[in-house]
Image (spheres, grey):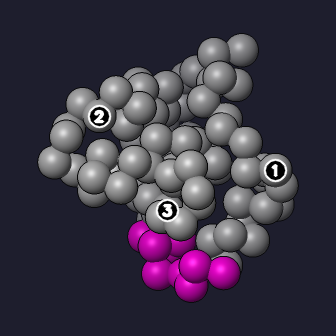
Amino acid sequence: MKYGGCVYITGNRSHSVLYIGVTSDLPARITAHRDKKYPDSFSAKYNCDKLFYYEIFGRIEEAITREKQIKKWKREWKEKLIDKMNPGWIDLYESLWT
């Protein structure tokens, strides 16, 4: 998967916690979340290891701008964004490899 940047939303199994992040290598970053590579991080502490949403951009700067925008949103708006791309809130991790 080749791109300049990606903004993504992960969450826990019960969908009670959402984490918004940005990366230039989505498969590697989500693998790090799943493996709890950084055990003291927010995502590890709250088990945000399910990939529910992502957007791909040509440049990392675009992804960072979008991440900052989404982080300011109300939770309801974030949920609607996820619902639009992924209505069943399935873990999209496996789709990164196909």
Name the residue beneath numbered marker 3: 18
- Foreground of the two, 52 or 8: 52
Badge number at residue 88? 1
Question: In percent of the image, x 65 and y 23: which residue is there?
Answer: 94
Relative to 23, residue 65 above or below: below
User: Which quadrant holds the C terminus?
Assistant: top right
> Quick check: is 3 in the magenta stretch?
no
Magenta stretch in the rendered image: 68-76
State whether residue 75 is above or below residue 50. below
Mark 1 belongs to which amino acid? Gly
Label 3, residues with CA under 10 Å away: few <14, some 14-19, many ≥20: many
Q: How far is disc 2 from disc 1 in space, using C-alphas?
A: 25 Å
Residue at the disc numbered 2: 36
| Apparent side of residue 98 relative to residue 14 in the rendered image (left or right) | right
Visible in this render: residue 30?
Answer: yes
Decide if residue 22 is in sight here. no
Quarter holding residue 78: bottom right
State the residue in front, 98 or 67. Answer: 98
Residue with the most extreme top position:
98
- Residue 44, given in percent of the width and then of the height, sits at 30, 46
